[in-house]
Amino acid sequence: MGRWQPGARERLEQAALDLFLEQGFTETTVPQITARAGLTTRTFFRHFADKREVLFAGEESVPERVARLMAQAPPSLGPMELITEGLAPAAAEIFQGRSLDYLLRRRAAIDAEPALHERELRKFSLMSAALEQGFRDRGVDDLTAQLAAEIAVTAFRIAVTRWLNQHGDPDLPATINQTLAAMRHLTNTPSLG
Amino acid sequence: MGRWQPGARERLEQAALDLFLEQGFTETTVPQITARAGLTTRTFFRHFADKREVLFAGEESVPERVARLMAQAPPSLGPMELITEGLAPAAAEIFQGRSLDYLLRRRAAIDAEPALHERELRKFSLMSAALEQGFRDRGVDDLTAQLAAEIAVTAFRIAVTRWLNQHGDPDLPATINQTLAAMRHLTNTPSLG
DNA sequence: TCAGTCATGGCACGTCGTGTCATCACTATC
DNA sequence: GATAGTGATGACACGACGTGCCATGACTGA
């Protein structure tokens, strides 16, 4: 495990987020982060592929967890049923271990920097690809699989945004279900307006 | 207009796309691009904010065109009606002036490079933001506006992908309408599966 | 005690992107 | 036709990013 001072990775994440919020992402240099964490620049890039990744550590496993959850679901469920019944509980476990305060601070940093926003979009794109493959593995045709995956991720993304805007007040599963209900209402009402 | 040799911007775009396809985005340096275009490195960054932008020039105007089109639509149309009736014709004019061959080559370059894929996602995010604001300006509530905007962009994005995969065979408006129909079918069928 | 392993430090280097100033072609005005 | 202005380009220096390579030092196991 950790030799020297343990928790180097966590110290880097903490220092980076603090500095991003204090002076901005662009204005923060990697040497500044490593100095605050008591390490060197070379070590930073051994833990994170680039400066942005320090805010996205640990999220590489999400796609494979998505695939596992979908494989465990009853095969009788259609894609839309799977979304409406499985999305909320599955989403809840994604943020386990991260405090609401951390999530809010992290989101403030991301919102302030287009480069980080792009990385966030890539995360959702990877989630969508995993969902799409999961649907195909359940026998769903290509177009429907892609549509269902994109719809699920869109609902998830909007719900997380709303949930954080409300400081976590209605919990995430409830917010997701509200969002899905609003989406159903929007697409099912022949002439909304 | 253009002094010296006119069309510097176009020469840079052409040289960059060729080189990206020949040897990859990362392996292509800016001096290589400018050498082929007969210019210098400094000039490249006067035309494009960074190395990726050379493939996304001219798309900054899309959001404002979206806003203009939405403002011109009959106020009686609800958000979902506006999407199903207005998305296909509006989308057709976005690619005007670009040959199908160019679009296919450009997409091959983007698909091969995650950094370019991220930039592509940002483009759609900006389109969605413009649509969302347009819906709000028409009196739609925040959540519905966001949902409608994301759904429209998702349908547009999937349709464009399918359209290019089929080398433009059914034209883009037809592909969009097919995609929207599939989405309606997916979300409106109570138990699909 | 000794060898192996692994995170870290240190250094050099290529590329990206920017700030700054000089240059040169074209244009307008007198 | 001479002259000043405008705008795109060239040239140079520089800081930051990210990587390759090798050295070091602490911990583990025999």
Image: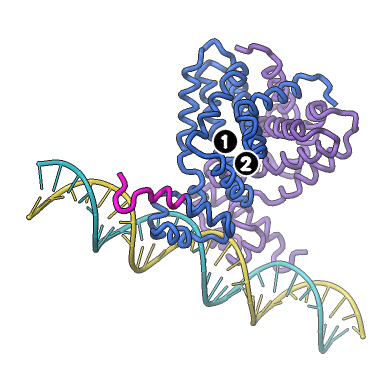
Chain colours: A blue, B purple, C yellow, D cyan
Please give the chain letter of the residue carrying mark 2.
Answer: B
User: Where does residue B75 sit, x and y in percent of width and height?
Assistant: 90, 33
- Asked if C25 appears above or below B1 in the picture, the reply is below
On the question of residue B109 being in view, the answer is no
Residue at screen point 29% across, 50% down: A3
Specify the segment rendered in magenta.
A1-13
User: Where does residue D6 sit, x and y in percent of width and height?
Assistant: 79, 73
Which is nearer the eye, A53 or A174?
A: A174
Any magenta on residue A171?
no
User: Mark 2, residues whose alpha carbon is within 10 Å: few (<14), some, or many (≥20)?
Assistant: some
User: Where does residue A99 sit, x and y in percent of width and height?
Assistant: 52, 39
Any magenta on residue A12?
yes
Which is nearer the eye, D19 or B163?
A: D19
Picture disc at residue A125: 1
- Label 1 SS: helix
Q: Amino acid at mark 1?
A: Ser
Question: In what quadrant of the picture does the N terminus of chain B appear?
Answer: bottom right
Residue at screen point 67% across, 44% down: B123
Residue at screen point 89% across, 38% down: B72
Please give left or right for residue D29 compared with residue A71 in the image. Answer: left
Residue occupied by mark 2? B121
Q: In the rendered image, which quarter is residue A175 located in?
A: top right
Total labels drawn: 2
Please give the chain letter of the residue carrying mark 1.
Answer: A
Q: In the rendered image, which quarter is residue B165 located in?
A: top right
Picture disc at residue A2: none
**CA–CA distance between discs 1 and 2?**
8 Å
User: Where does residue A26 sit, x and y in percent of width and height?
Assistant: 57, 58
Same chain shared by disc 1 and disc 2: no
Please give left or right for residue A133 compared with residue A9 in the image. Answer: right
- Asked if B58 appears above or below B132 in the picture, the reply is below
